[in-house]
Amino acid sequence: MTSEVFNANPTIVATAAPTARRRAAHSLWLSDDEDSDIYDSDDEPEPIDADEIFDLIRSISDPEHRSMTLEQLAVVSAPQITVAPSRILIEFTPTVPHCGMSTLIGLSIRVRLLRALPTRFKVDIRVKPGSHQSEHAVNKQLNDKERVAAALENPSLVEVLETCLQGAGRRGL
Amino acid sequence: MDIVLSHKIASVAELAGHDDRAWHVAWNPSKPLLATCSADKSVRLYSYTVDPSPRFSLHTSIPTGHTKTVRGIAWSPSGSTLATASFDANIGIWKREGQDENDEEAAREWECVSILEGHETECKSVAWSCSGTLLASCSRDKTVWVWEAQPDADFECMGVLMEHTQDVKYVAWHPTEEILASASYDDTIKLYLDDPSEDWFCFSTLTGHSSTVWSLAWSPNGQYLASASDDCTIRIWKRITKHEWECVLVLEDHERTVYAITWGPGKPGTTQTGGESLGWLASTGGDGRINVWAFEEHPDSTQKSPPKHTLIARLENAHGVSDVNSIAWCPRTGYEDLIATVGDDGVAKIWKVVSA
């Protein structure tokens, strides 16, 4: 990994609690452990909303500032998530437009959702328009499933990803 | 969307078995064998009988020894050799032990007779030339390699083509001439020829797609090239002079990335307007849809006129919710209406295009 610092002094925002509606509706979520994600054993598709997607990715660690989450750095937020019946579009906002970690952030979001969501969802991940100087290149890489698959067979990259995803199961709690 | 089409796509067989995403499917051109490859690093071979109706059974599963995903596979024109392209950057060459034609003893195993090393990163596609003497490979390292097959499973590199500015996704040889096409993450297609006194060189760059080009298919008569892209379109390029190809048609019937296309002869006698049949083109991709078009040459076609095309069949959710990664027409005479697909569900499926 590069030792270059892309944003030495990022802005940190206050985080919100997990959505109350979901807490009430699904006790499953409260007894969350790292491995029990939301795979359904039955075939009945259960609707999912932007808040639930946000809860899955908010606690991913920032690859540059490992002690902080993507939510704390305002890289991800619920309003940047769009959910159609089986399509999910996630926009994220790198903290600085030259952020060299953007593809890694996007990859960590993709891997988190690959592991947590049922396969019926088609996920598109993009940087927020205008938020990154290599917007097109980052978007293209993140949505090329062959490149993502190859990246996940690269042990050193997977090691970095796993570090970022270690706390992802906290879901803002 | 309700559209009335002349044909429908009927399920013939479902072949589960891979433990992970299946990437590519290839019919043996001379033997009743179908090969699939997967992120599980294995190749599965299915044998089939066609009488009275197509029946498929597992012939063997080859663990391959590749250390990463097996991304692409290609049968030599003779059907005796299989090439594998892997994310471990190597190409494997496979033959059946004691290659003895007409001896169908199942006991003989497929063995790796050669490993072609040279690519620096993931190898994504391999293809044999029509004569079987040349093999092309491509990689994320942005290069296309042309290898010459020599006796005793020896391969010599005849050229390294560094024309693309990005990841090369797919290579395909012209059906009758030694023209090679490559498709890339740089959104272009490049065409190459061998200069007898020099080296292999790129003689044309086809631009028009607005995103990654994932797959290529030549028309059986060699006068057209089809390309499938992340821009959700298929482009049809026409040979307007010996070395000039131009886009004459853009098909927009997919909602997500078009990962694969295949162009076969189609069922004889199915032209719509009496023109010369150019065969059937089938496409599939991230939307899980299979489209089949019948192509015909217009009776009054001009140099740059597009072929007549009719969508004859469509199937949604061919692999359930999964992406479909590869599609291929059966090459066997009399069974040109059979297609194989593989998907992210790890399953291979066989379909028949039948009159509705």
Image (cartoon, rainbow, N blue to C red):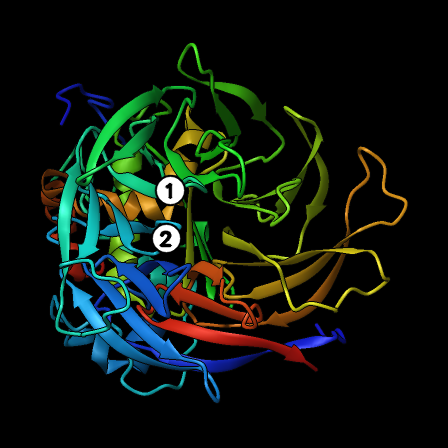
Tag 1 and tag 2, C-beta contact below 8 Å: yes
Specify whether disc 1 shares its chain with disc 2. yes
Query: Is residue B146 visible from the viewing direction of this image?
Result: yes
Horizontal arrangement in the rendering, residue B59 relative to residue B145 (left or right): left
The amino acid type of the residue labelled 1 equals Gly
**In what element is the residue under mark 2?**
loop
Residue B236, horizontal then vertical, whole percent? 66, 42
The foreground one among B316 and B206 is B206
Name the residue beneath numbered marker 1: B132
Query: Is residue A70 visible from the viewing direction of this image?
Result: no
Horizontal arrangement in the rendering, residue B62 relative to residue B341 (left or right): left
Few, some or many C-alpha atoms within 10 Å of disc 1 (few <14, some 14-19, many ≥20)? some
**In what element is the residue under mark 1?**
loop
Q: Quadrant of residue B92?
A: top left
Q: Quadrant of residue A131?
A: top left
Q: Residue at position x 19%, y 60% from top? A: B42
Residue B122, horizontal then vertical, whole percent? 25, 38
Residue B4, horizontal then vertical, whole percent? 76, 76
Residue A158, horizontal then vertical, whole percent? 14, 45
Q: Residue at position x 18%, y 20% from top? A: A5
The foreground one among B33 and A35 is B33
Q: Chain of mark 2?
A: B
Q: CA distance from mark 1 to mark 2?
A: 7 Å
Q: Residue at position x 37%, y 19% from top? A: B162
The amino acid type of the residue labelled 2 equals Ser
In which quadrant of the rendered image does the C terminus of chain A lie? bottom left
Name the residue beneath numbered marker 2: B78
